[in-house]
Image (spheres, rainbow, N blue to C red):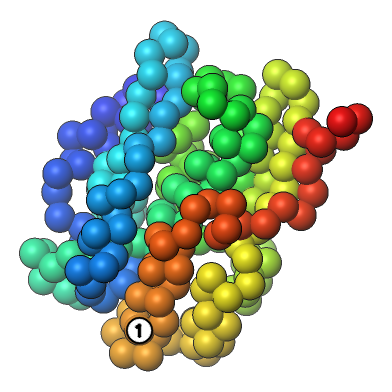
Amino acid sequence: MRKYILILAIVVGSFSFLQGCEKAENKSTEINSLLGQIKPLQVQHDDNEVLSISVNQAMAFHENHEHSHSQAEDSHPSNDHHLCMGVLTGYQAIRYAVDELFGQSVPQASDFEISVTGPMDGVWDMMSLYTGKEMRFEGEPQPMDLKSFTFTARKISEDKSLVFGLRPGIIPEEFFELKNQGATCGNPELSKLKQQALLNILSVEPDKCFEVINNDSDAGQ
């Protein structure tokens, strides 16, 4: 199952990014430039082979998963390009958690757990891709706010855990207000706020994008 998920992402990795609820309407030149600077995530699975996951593969995996669960017609032309903010946030969150818990080591997927408070599909798909197992939000969705992006990660072999979240201002407060009022991807103001959030996430290192809420791995040090 783990290999299937990763192979599926690689196969569709060269496809165009399609539409989705948490996607920016257009990618600016600056965003494209910043995307090109992101190093692939690395993870080991049962055969100890080190697998690299690029942002492109992560986006394509999310799009494939999204469309396999929806029969609705695309609201954008198929050649449009869109970037999922949830996938990108999850991507950077995994990078941050791995750096904090594993240092320079490449983690075994079976030794790493991660979850998030909110129901954002893009984030959950990103975590599914990295861990190699299907992960879905369970619970009653609440209005989206900064706390929706609170992550809990764990290095199982050493029972080290880390709770962290997006720093205030990374996603503009106005974005949450519009989303909770029912604004959709076609809303120009929401689209502009997404673009700003994407730039904020991409333009800083993960340790400037996220802040620690609780770090059990520091206990006893």
Total of numbered circles in the picture?
1
> Where is 19 relative to 88, above or below?
below
Specify whether residue 118 is in view. no
Question: Which quadrant is home to the C terminus?
Answer: top right
Q: Quadrant of residue 98?
A: top right
Camera-side residue of 103 and 171? 103
Label 1 Cα neighbours within 10 Å, binned few <14 / some 14-19 / many ≥20: some
- Look at 39% across and 67% down and name the residue there: 198
Residue at position x 77%, y 26% in the image:
159
Give the residue at the far right of this rendering: 220
The residue lying at 37 percent from left, 90 percent from top is: 189
User: Which element type, helix, strand or loop, lies under badge 1?
Assistant: helix
- In the rendered image, is residue 199 in sight? yes
* Image spot of residue 41 (x, y percent): 41, 36
Please say if 155 is above or below 31. Answer: above
Query: What x and y, as percent, mark residue 115?
Result: 62, 46
Q: Residue at x 23, y 72 (%)?
A: 28
**Nearer to me, 93 or 122:** 93
- Spot occupied by residue 93 in the image (x, y as percentages of width and height): 54, 49
From the viewer's side, name the closer residue of 61 and 44.
44
For residue 52, side relative to residue 33 (left or right) = right
Q: Quadrant of the N terminus?
A: top left
Instruction: Report which residue position mark 1 lands on.
Output: 192
- In the rendered view, tell whether residue 12 sits above or below residue 220: below
Instruction: Please state which amino acid type lies under the numbered disc 1.
Output: Lys
Q: Is residue 139 left or right of residue 43?
A: right
* Towards the viewer: 121 or 167: 167
Q: Position of residue 106 (x, y in %)?
A: 50, 23
